[in-house]
Image: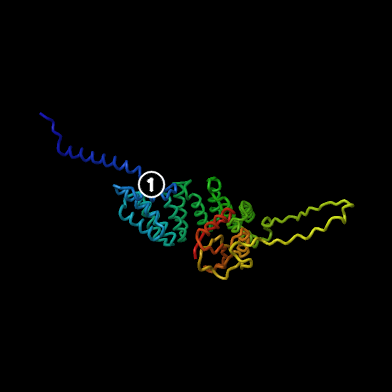
Amino acid sequence: MAFRIPQAYRKLVFTLLLIILAVAANAAMRKEFSELVNMYNKGKIDEVQDALGTLKPNSDEERACVGYYHAMLKIKKAEALTAHEQVVAKYPKSNFAQMSLLEIGKFHILERDIDDAKASLKKISSTELMERFYWLGFCAWWQDDFTVAINNAENYLRMDVNGEYAEAAHYLIAECYLNQKKAYSAITTLNKLLNMKLPDVDEQYLLYRLGYAHEQSDKLADALGFYQRGYEMNKYSQVAYLIEDRLFELRNRSKSIDISFLYPYSLLQIPVETETPSEIGTKPVSPALPILSPATPAHQAPNAPVKLSAKPSSGYWIQAGRFSQEANANKLVINIRLLSLPAAYYEDVSGGKKTWVVLSGAYEEKAKAEAARTQLVSNEINCFVTQY
């Protein structure tokens, strides 16, 4: 008598075979999608664009992958936001939907729509996206909920202590403590960051924040020490100008504060040639040396005003700094003009606070502005291109 396989068992085996075949097919495709992810992470945008036109997704995860990277390549913010929202709506269980929620949260933060940002970030459940805790902390800080901000930032550090936002998370925690008038806690937090020796930490900015935290705790001598260390790392950076502002504030608080290192003048050394008695009266008198003026900046009239009457209304410009003291803005303008680049500053009043913004420009094309920005960055002047 032949052995007969029960009908239910045959259905089960058939179903398992289908699952195995589907997994095998998906595995073959998934390698191609993994390559897409790797290309994007390596910045090979053109190759990603080409691949998106040829890939044939056959599962929701792969469709979500294609949708996510289409969204990431969108240039206009509104189009990118819509594309990410479509990924979330169509493939809610996908890992890429989780990643799109993170991007949506960032978009809302950029637009200062903090409540919408929080709503999007709180929907993320993926254990791989620890970054969300940093951004939730940022949102809480923005809304002056400092305790929640500290908790979220500390959660991020516990789960990803050396992560991309480790440095920023420490600054966020320290800033919250300063807002709570807990300067000693801020100092402790910043010292932790200093001792971590992360490879890409902006040490000059860290010293600046340590100086400020000590200043807020009335440890003026310690504040001066950190400010001086930071200033002497790079005297021409944006952070150095911020440090100068704080040093003058320190000097206003205590006249005993010595900030002479800002202007380390030394005696003028003039070499004198010794003449023998027989040579006296035989040499022609050397003419007076001409007075040299700084090189005239390219594309700028020699007598162009250093200060603009108002904020520009058109063109491409490079913003190189914002200062609370006009003298620092004037100093940076001079340094930029000595690089043969046009520069000026304007006065800005916002929220009752007056600041002075340094610009280089105007440039007719964005490419020319980017070239000038590269020159400024190579001379250790941090800046960015903006359009009015």
Depicted 344 relative to depicted 91: above or below: below
Q: In which quarter of the image is residue 86?
A: bottom left
- Which residue is at 51% across, 60% downward? 385
Q: Is residue 3 left or right of residue 116?
A: left
| Label 1: which secondary element | helix
How far across and down, in percent of the image, does residue 220 sit?
63, 56
* Quadrant where the image shows the N terminus: top left
Label 1: which residue? 36
Tell me the amino acid under the disc marked 1: Leu
How far across and down, in percent of the image, does residue 214 sit?
59, 55
Density class for disc 1 (Cα within 10 Å; few <14, some 14-19, many ≥20) is many
Q: Which residue lies furthest to the right in this view?
A: 278
- Which residue is at 78% across, 54% downward? 270
Q: Which residue lies furthest to the bottom in this view?
A: 309
Closer to us: 175 or 237: 237
Closer to us: 261 or 271: 271
All told, the count of numbered labels is 1
Q: Quadrant of residue 251?
A: bottom right
How far across and down, in percent of the image, does residue 118 sit?
40, 58
- Which residue is at 73% across, 55% downward? 266
Closer to us: 75 or 172: 75
Q: Which residue lies furthest to the top in this view?
A: 1
Closer to us: 220 or 234: 234
The colour scheme is: rainbow
How far across and down, in percent of the image, does residue 295 sit?
65, 60
Is residue 55 visible in this depiction of the protein? yes
Is residue 212 visible in this depiction of the protein? no
